[in-house]
Image (spheres, rainbow, N blue to C red):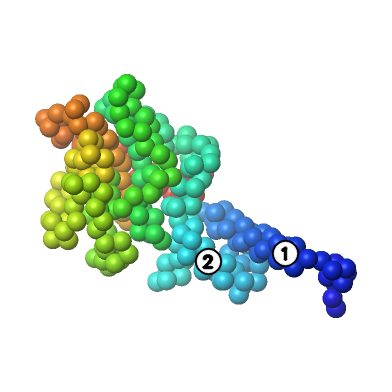
Amino acid sequence: MMSLRRQAGEPESERRARTESRVLGKGLQVLRAVVDSTSPVTLKTIADRSGIPLSTTHRLLEEMELQGWIVHDRESCRIEVAPALIGIAAAISNRYAIEDAVRPVLRDLVAATGETVCLNLIDRAAWRLVTWCVEESTRPLGYRLSEGEMSYLHTGASGRAAMAYLSADDFHQVLRRHGLPRLTKSTITARAKLRSVLTTVRRAGYAYSRGERMAEAVGIAAPIFGVDGTIRGSLLITIPRFRFAVSDKVILARSAIAHATTLGELMPRMRNGN
């Protein structure tokens, strides 16, 4: 039976807007069910918790995956929030309880080094790195990093500290998706050289770069692993080249590694937001 609004000659644009609004509402219900889960969950669990039919939930999650909001592990059939969505949240709020857990670690590293530091997470949907949380240097000159910004994994210390520990399949997915675009004259664009540098990262336990993302910046980054041993991201110290002494590299790297280990222990809280 045709609705009274349609009988009254409701404009097509208004009908379309109402339909899109209903779809958006269902999408937010589904997304909330994923966000509220304390661990990766199945499609059926999400449908049950959101109250949305299974087939509709499946279609909505497929679109969210394409947009990079959720990660769907086909092997385990589990779904969780993607770092890209966390990056969006980072640009909107201060992350409340999560900030309480993470920022003291970053501030301690700033106090120890005097330089800007940032926590980065791998977005496995887009295969890029998300700048998730930044603490600025107290010195008058330094580099400003933007929370929520995305970067390539092969560029700079922050990306390679994470990329070095990807599986072979994931490594090739990154190359197929993005290749090795050049950002500065120092950016690594040859696959053989990249593999060699990543081997060095694994041996040293940290990554080092000069002028690869920003021409006059030095980066030292340590990998961050989740409690399950999976690489999650990196912890970066960024230093203006004029203020960097090569003799300090190992000391800075050790400090980055120690603080990255602490952050790794916080990964469940960072992911689940409690």
Residue name at image x 37 percent, y 37 percent: 145
Q: Between disc 1 and disc 2, whose residue precedes?
A: 1
The amino acid on which the numbered mark 1 sits, given as a three-letter code, is Ser
Q: Tell me which amino acid carries mark 2.
A: Glu
Pick the front one: 69 or 53: 69
Query: Who's the residue at 35% across and 59% down the image?
Result: 127
14 or 229: nearer the eye? 14
**Residue visible at 38% across and 32% down in the picture:** 135
The percent position of residue 173, horizontal first and vertical second, equals 30, 66
The residue carrying mark 2 is 63
Q: Which residue is mark 1?
A: 13
Residues packed near mark 1 inside 10 Å, few (<14), some (14 to 19) or many (20 plus): few
**Is residue 255 at least partly visible in the picture?**
no
Task: Locate residue 1: give its quadrant.
Answer: bottom right
Q: Above or below — where is 179 with respect to 187? A: below
Indicate whether 88 appears above or below 230. Answer: above
